[in-house]
Image (cartoon, rainbow, N blue to C red):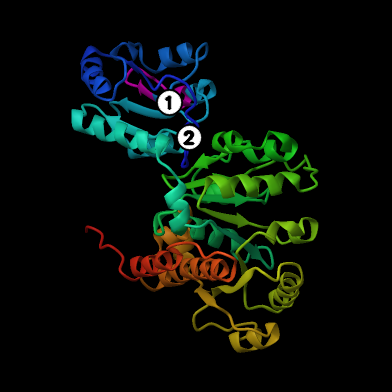
Amino acid sequence: MNAPFQARAGLRDPFTAFVCDDATADMLRPVAVEHGWSPEKVNKGGLRNAVQSLSISASPNILFVDMSESADPLNDINALAEVCEPGTIVIATGQVNDVRLYRDLVASGIHDYLLKPFTVEQLRDTFAHAQMVISGPRGEAQADKPHVMTAVVGVRGGVGASTIATSLAWLLGERAHRSTALLDLDIHFGTGALALDLEPGRGLTDAIENPSRIDGLFIERAMVRANERLSVLSAEAPIHQPLVTDGTAFFQLQEEMRNAFESTVIDLPRHMLIQYPHMVHDAHVAVVVSELTLAATRDTIRILAWLKSNAPQTKVIVVANGVPSGGALEISRKDFEQSIERPVDIVFPHDGKLAAQSAKLGKPMAEVASGKMSAPFNTLAGMVLSHATEEGANGDAKPVGARSLVDNLKSMLAKPKAKAA
């Protein structure tokens, strides 16, 4: 349905509504006329009628549906998604005041949910924002926000690379105000969607099985939306079904995400460096996540050497994760840095309580963290954007406004908004 990037409006009707009561219809019709839409497009019947009607006709650019008479809103919305064409902006209304329902609806692709009774001004604001999503040009945004692609690689399993990748994607979306894609390439055991309390869907496995299907419309349909600026492509493929691919699908996914989003974060399992070395060729930044152990030190040395040989243009950030405070270390930071022949850029201290809270809430650790624990996440986001800006400056043409983007991000991170008690 709706997507975090420009929808392909085509030549469909600009607006259609399906409502359950006369009061809602009477409020909608004059607002529709204000936007130049036909008041006759306001139909009676609600969500079920919308599904039946759109199964035999083209869906509009903006669809307003009333869920007041729906006994199972989520299932009905999923049924609506099956008959809606990609790019349709869906605005729902209903009488259930439940934050969990709202989150589930947004995750399912709903643009907005208006709780009854709503005002005419709320309706106008929602329609105005929907039109911005459809018709808003990306040209100026591209100039101010050149695409940033980051690959996050854990040197060993369990070092927390997926946790950091999810948090980085969230920060680029929420704090840097970039439309961001999180591509989780652990096909069988990925946690990108799980960490955000989402169902991964079949988009990624479909892409691998049918690379020829991958285009802008496929991305729009396959991505699972976490919030207004962050979308996820992940999978939980059956472990008895190995996925055989030559890597074409991964390359095409990168290309389409580069066109559709302002940032891409790839959660890249280390074994894919061997099978698909091209995955990091176009990455501006590679975040190498390690821990201070003997085995991790060995593998950090090997992966850094691999990156130097196979992706010399990619900026590398070394992260030491899960470092205990005051506890005995298997290898000291000094010895680790001497072994890998470069400094550690960022240290993430171990915090079991924060990790547990993040998992329980279904939110990335960067969103839950506060105080000193939030500093490493903020530093990482700033470094990623700084490195990407430097890469642009070293190229043939420096992106307009790129430096101010990094400065703005750093100022936002340095002065977080105070939350109400």
Q: Is residue 362 visible?
A: no
User: Where is 329 relative to 349, above or below?
Assistant: below
User: Where is 68 relative to 126, above or below?
Assistant: above
Helix, strand or loop for disc 1: loop
Q: Earlier in the sequence, mark 1 or mark 2?
A: 2
Disc 2 residue crowd, few under 14, some 14–19, many 20+, Cα 10 Å:
many
Question: The magenta stretch spans which residues?
Answer: 63-77
Name the residue nearer the viewer: 239 or 208: 208
Q: Position of residue 158 (x, y in %)?
A: 64, 63
> Residue 110's image quarter?
top left
Q: Residue at x 52, y 25 (%)?
A: 85
Q: CA distance from mark 1 to mark 2?
A: 9 Å
Q: Where is mark 2, residue-wise? A: 7
Outermost residue toward the front in this view: 396
- Residue 75 in the magenta stretch? The answer is yes
Looking at the rendered structure, the kind of residue marked 1 is Asn
Q: Quadrant of the C terminus?
A: bottom left
Q: Where is mark 1, residue-wise? A: 61
Helix, strand or loop for disc 2: loop
Q: What numbered label is drawn on residue 362? A: none
- Residue 304 in the magenta stretch? The answer is no
Name the residue nearer the viewer: 262 or 375: 262
Name the residue nearer the viewer: 243 or 61: 61
Q: Position of residue 314 (x, y in %)?
A: 65, 68
Disc 1 residue crowd, few under 14, some 14–19, many 20+, Cα 10 Å:
many
Q: Residue at x 52, y 29 (%)?
A: 86
Looking at the rendered structure, the kind of residue marked 2 is Ala
User: Where is 247 relative to 95, above or below?
Assistant: below
Q: Residue at x 72, y 35 (%)?
A: 212
